[in-house]
Amino acid sequence: MVDFHHMFSAYGLGATLYVPIIHHKVPDILTGRTNSPASSVVLCLEDALAESDVERAVGTLRELLPQINQSSDLRVFVRPRSLSMGHRLASFKNIDRIEGFVAPKVRPDTTADWMQLVSSAGLAIMPTLESADYFDPGCIVAFRDVLSDYDHRLVSAVRLGGNDFLGALGLRRERGMTSWEGPLGWVLSMCSSMLISAGYPVAAPVFDIIDDPDTLRREVQRDVAAGFVSKTVIHPCQVPIIVEGMKVSEQELQQAKAIIEKDALAVFQIGGAMCEPATHSNWARRVLARERIFGCKSASSPGIPMRVCV
């Protein structure tokens, strides 16, 4: 039985901002002196750092942990460079002030090691699928089967590394094309259907062309339709686009409320669409979860403008 309460609560991740832990704004965000532009943040010690910066970054994390504002709603994660670094960081005093680890390049044969690490440390995890292995549906199944041996509530979400997937093909994102329109579309569909149906929230990959807001809007619309609960961002100016895209329409909200009514008819229509509580109740609960977290779009609301980011 899928735990939709856990699934839908993951919408609280919203736009997830990845930032190198040595970025000069990180201390102010973690202490609350500066409001975070995103509802969740990943402090990266992996690809965002040069090898020469790693030890400085580890030291920075150790210094910042006791300063994290625990009264804030900001959800803080750390992305270690490797499993061995994860063990090292898990031993730090005050590591429990973060929600969990974002595990890089997780494979079926390393999943149990990561799950055991976070379970023993009292942390959550966001495993990242980003290797060419996952072009094989059997690899997704194997990963899912290992996860099923552990408490599903340990998994805040499963993240997908779109750039790494493309890199495995010798490609990169094309301007004007969403991830769904390129070679990743099949992988995204497989991951969403195979993992969400097993009760694991899935987060959409990053959109890394910062000055193309129209394509980002189209991509977020497709992400939402696939059931993704969050999306990685690399610049704060992308956050409003994602938040707006996660909002529900007034008609969706009307339909959802009617579907979960105790005395709802077995079949009815609203706005020209058939509503059938027996099959649409989980969709309705998903819509209500999105509305609670992101709100409702006004019928006359224009798209959120996106300034050019530098």
Image (cartoon, helix red, strand yellow):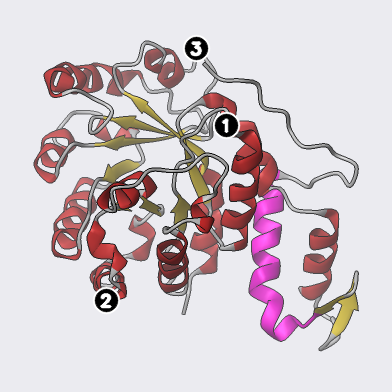
Q: Residue at x 15, y 23 (%)?
A: 54
> Residue at image x 50%, y 61%?
7
Name the residue type under label 3: Arg
Give the residues in magenta. Answer: 275-294
Q: For mark 1, does the 10 Å Cα neighbourhood hold few (<14), some (14 to 19), or many (20 or more) residues?
A: many
The percent position of residue 114, horizontal first and vertical second, equals 19, 53
Q: Amino acid at mark 2?
A: Gly
By secondary structure, the bulk of the magenta-drawn segment is best described as helix
Could you tell me residue 260's position as x and y percent? 76, 73
Determine whether the residue tagged by mark 1 lies in a helix, strand or loop: helix
Q: Secondary structure at mark 2?
A: helix
Marks 2 and 1, Cα distance to the nearest angstrom? 34 Å
Give whichever of 273, 73 is nearer the camera.
273
What numbered label is drawn on residue 238? 1
Query: Which dot marks residue 33?
Result: 3
Side (left or right) of 204 relative to 121: right
